[in-house]
Image (cartoon, rainbow, N blue to C red):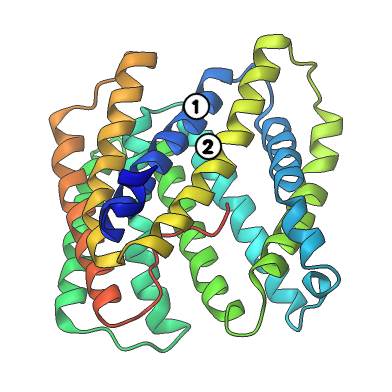
């Protein structure tokens, strides 16, 4: 299309980014719609099979180089982080509003800031530390600590964000020497092996509707990851960072329209602090030419 080719790179990147958010929202809605009728490990196993099939042309094109790695242990650690992030985040998704899960997941970028200092020995300026502190204040607001403690599934979402930060940190290390298809290949191998046995043990035969939802989860998840990667290849990270607010708006709209979920004012107040801190951190990273921690490499 001529208008697309003539559009500025940042505008095209923005369209791709928003399209990715819609696909990720559809993926999460699909998982939530399946609910507890199908074991989560089974859904994730079939999803990973679909993702692997869709990525097979990439693996074949990179064969046999895609199989070569100098960091096998780190590859499987990255796979373990990915498994933990999915199990924690998607389990919480079945029990709390989609918008709440999305908002708390932004804490991953805050954890990445801390992990980059501890593991990668990066230097973080005072303004980024202040942004991180403000972000964690927002997290505490959303967690609603009280005399009864903190909600289990809200904490599970936060643990999933911590695993997500582990994914980003390990990928930063691996990216220095490993090919993209190698990282994706070993993640696929780890997840399929880890999920295969519990899937066989707890298998529930899906009906046609459930098969359709599982296919939706696999296809939209892969498509969303592709689009968000293309968005960052097309537009500048500093220009795309503010669009993270759109992710939360889309999650809120899907949660309300499909599941009649409407977050309260406390969630929005905490989310505003977390998302604001996230956007600022991403903007500072892009200004300094550092990898953008907002891009989860194919969870």
Q: Quadrant of residue 294?
A: bottom left
Side (left or right) of 219 relative to 255 = right
Residue at the spot of label 2: 90
In this view, the residue in front, 114 or 254, is 254
Mark carried by residue 208? none
Q: Residue drawn at (38%, 69%), measured in percent from left and top?
A: 292
Location of residue 47 by image quarter: top right
Confirm or deny contact between disc 2 and disc 1 (CB under 8 A).
Answer: yes
- List x then y, in percent, for residue 268: 17, 37
The one nearer the camera, 10 or 225, is 10
In percent of width and height, residue 150 lies at 33, 41
Say above or below: 1 vs 123.
above
Q: Can residue 124 be seen in this view?
A: yes
Q: Please, is residue 54 above or below residue 58 in the view?
A: above
Q: Total of numbered circles in the picture? A: 2
Q: Which residue is drawn at 39% across and 15% down?
A: 258
Q: Dividing the image into 4 quarters, which one contains the N terminus?
A: top left
Which x, y percent locates residue 79? 67, 60
The residue at the point 55 percent across, 27 percent down is 31
Instruction: Report whether 69 appears left or right of 209.
Output: right
Residue 94 badge: 1
Quarter of the image holding residue 199? top right
Relative to residue 61, is residue 183 drawn left or right? Answer: left
**Badge 1 density bin: few <14, some 14–19, many ≥20, Cα 10 Å:** many
What kind of element bears circle 2?
helix
């Amino acid at each position: 299309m001529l208008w697309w080719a003539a559009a500025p790179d940042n505008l095209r990147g923005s369209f791709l980014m928003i399209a990715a958010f819609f696909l990720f929202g559809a993926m999460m809605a699909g998982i939530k719609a399946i609910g507890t009728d199908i074991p989560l490990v089974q859904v994730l196993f079939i999803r990973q099979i679909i993702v692997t099939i869709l990525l097979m042309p990439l693996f074949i094109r990179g064969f046999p180089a895609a199989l070569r790695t100098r960091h096998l242990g780190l590859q499987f650690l990255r796979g373990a982080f990915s498994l933990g992030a999915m199990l924690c985040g998607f389990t919480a998704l079945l029990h709390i509003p989609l918008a709440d899960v999305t908002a708390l997941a932004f804490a991953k970028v805050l954890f990445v800031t801390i992990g980059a200092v501890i593991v990668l020995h990066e230097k973080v300026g005072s303004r980024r530390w202040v942004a991180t502190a403000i972000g964690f204040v927002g997290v505490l607001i959303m967690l609603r600590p009280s005399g009864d403690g903190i909600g289990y599934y809200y904490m599970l979402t936060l643990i999933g964000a911590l695993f997500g930060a582990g994914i980003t940190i390990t990928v930063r290390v691996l990216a220095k020497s490993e090919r993209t298809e190698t990282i994706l290949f070993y993640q696929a191998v780890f997840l399929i092996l880890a999920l295969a046995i519990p899937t066989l043990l707890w298998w529930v035969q899906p009906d046609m509707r459930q098969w359709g939802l599982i296919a939706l989860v696999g296809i939209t998840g892969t498509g969303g990851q592709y689009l968000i990667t293309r968005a960052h290849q097309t537009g500048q990270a500093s220009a795309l960072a503010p669009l993270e607010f759109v992710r939360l708006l889309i999650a809120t709209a899907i949660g309300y329209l499909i599941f009649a979920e409407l977050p309260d004012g406390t969630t929005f107040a905490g989310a505003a602090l977390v998302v604001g801190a996230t956007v600022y951190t991403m903007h500072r990273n892009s200004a300094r030419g550092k990898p953008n921690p907002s891009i989860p490499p194919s969870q």
